[in-house]
């Protein structure tokens, strides 16, 4: 299975994802806010599932970094990210996070809309690899879809999410197709289960950073 089962044409990815995910841009601002508060210097940063380079571009615009590595399984995504983030401090690598080759190298690892594409056993491997890639006291920030605690809650939240997509320009048929991917093309787990898995991987601090619609941001520290 690929790391990311992309539901959009790659050329339209950035446009389409803003019509699909509520407050998509806000996810990146939340990362910026946390890193600024931590006041880390000369950052070594790994972005897994980098997509078109939105996270990397945000980092370059806000921080003085020593090195940034962007990985993605999709060659075309990496090419687009390279165009957006043409900087000698940024390295691009076609790689699956489940085969991540790094050990204790980075101060920050980000995973934006990545983990929910994995089933539980694969998710644990991905999270543990990110933990291993971090230096001591390094931080891990992920944003992903989550599963509500009840069928009734899931039905309500999915209906709300579908309405958001229609209001933002999708047809009813397009929105229906995307909502049907829940549990079929991506595999969310509850927020508490995500926190538990991160603790099992070894993170000493795990906190909810942000929640909106059916997306959650989680902050963890090694």
Image (tube, helix red, strand yellow):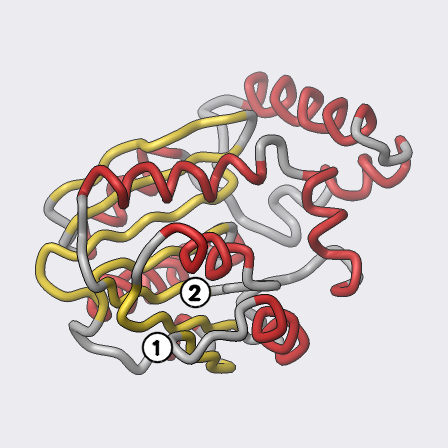
Could you say where residue 35 lies in the image, as x and y percent from the top left?
Answer: 27, 45
Could you tell me which residue is drawn at 30 percent across and 60 percent down?
Answer: 64
Q: Is disc 1 placed on a helix, strand or loop? A: loop
Q: Residue at x 58, y 17 (%)?
A: 152
The image's mark for residue 171 is none
Crowd band around label 1 with a 10 angstrom C-alpha radius: few (<14), some (14–19), many (20+): some
Q: CA distance from mark 2 to mark 1?
A: 9 Å
* Left or right, residue 220 beside residue 168: left
Residue denoted by label 1: 100
Classify residue 24 by image quadrant: top right
The image quadrant that residue 59 belongs to is: bottom left
Q: Quadrant of the N terminus?
A: bottom right
On screen, residue 182 above or below 52:
above
Residue carrying label 2: 48
Taking the image as shown, residue 81 lies to the left or right of residue 126, namely: right
What residue sits 51% from the left and 64% below the top? 50
Q: Are marks 2 and 1 in contact (CB under 8 Å)?
A: yes
Residue in the picture at 85% in, 36% down: 170
| Residue 1 can be seen, yes or no | no
Image coordinates of residue 58 in percent, x first then y, are 47, 52
Which quadrant of the view contains residue 11? bottom right
- Residue 154 in view (yes/no): yes
- The answer to whether residue 73 is left or right of residue 64 is right
Task: Tell me the SS state at disc 2.
Answer: strand
The tag earlier along the polypeptide, 2 or 1, is 2
Q: Between residues 84 and 105, which one lies in front from this camera angle? A: 84
Quadrant in the picture for the C terminus: bottom left
Front-most of 176 and 151? 176
Task: Mark 2: give few (<14), some (14-19) or many (20+) Cα within 10 Å.
Answer: many
Residue 97: % across, % down? 41, 71
């Amino acid at each position: 299975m690929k790391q990311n089962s992309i539901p959009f044409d790659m050329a339209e990815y950035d446009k389409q994802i803003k019509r699909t995910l509520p407050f998509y841009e806000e996810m990146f601002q939340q990362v910026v806010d946390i890193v600024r508060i931590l006041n880390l210097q000369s950052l070594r940063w790994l972005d897994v599932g980098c997509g078109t380079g939105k996270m990397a571009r945000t980092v370059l615009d806000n921080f003085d970094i020593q090195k940034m590595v962007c990985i993605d399984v999709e060659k075309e995504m990496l090419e687009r990210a390279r165009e957006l983030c043409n900087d000698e401090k940024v390295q691009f690598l076609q790689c699956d996070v489940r085969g991540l080759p790094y050990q204790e190298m980075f101060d920050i690892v980000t995973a934006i809309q990545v983990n929910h594409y994995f089933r539980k056993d694969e998710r644990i491997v991905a999270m543990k690899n990110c933990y291993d890639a971090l230096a001591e006291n390094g931080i891990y920030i992920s944003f992903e879809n989550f599963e509500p605690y009840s069928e009734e809650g899931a039905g309500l939240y999915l209906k709300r999410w579908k309405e958001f997509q229609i209001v933002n320009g999708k047809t009813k048929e397009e929105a229906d197709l995307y909502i049907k991917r829940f549990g079929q093309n991506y595999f969310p787990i509850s927020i508490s289960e995500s926190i538990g898995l991160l603790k099992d991987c070894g993170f000493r601090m795990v906190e909810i950073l942000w929640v909106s619609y059916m997306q959650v941001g989680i902050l963890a520290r090694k």
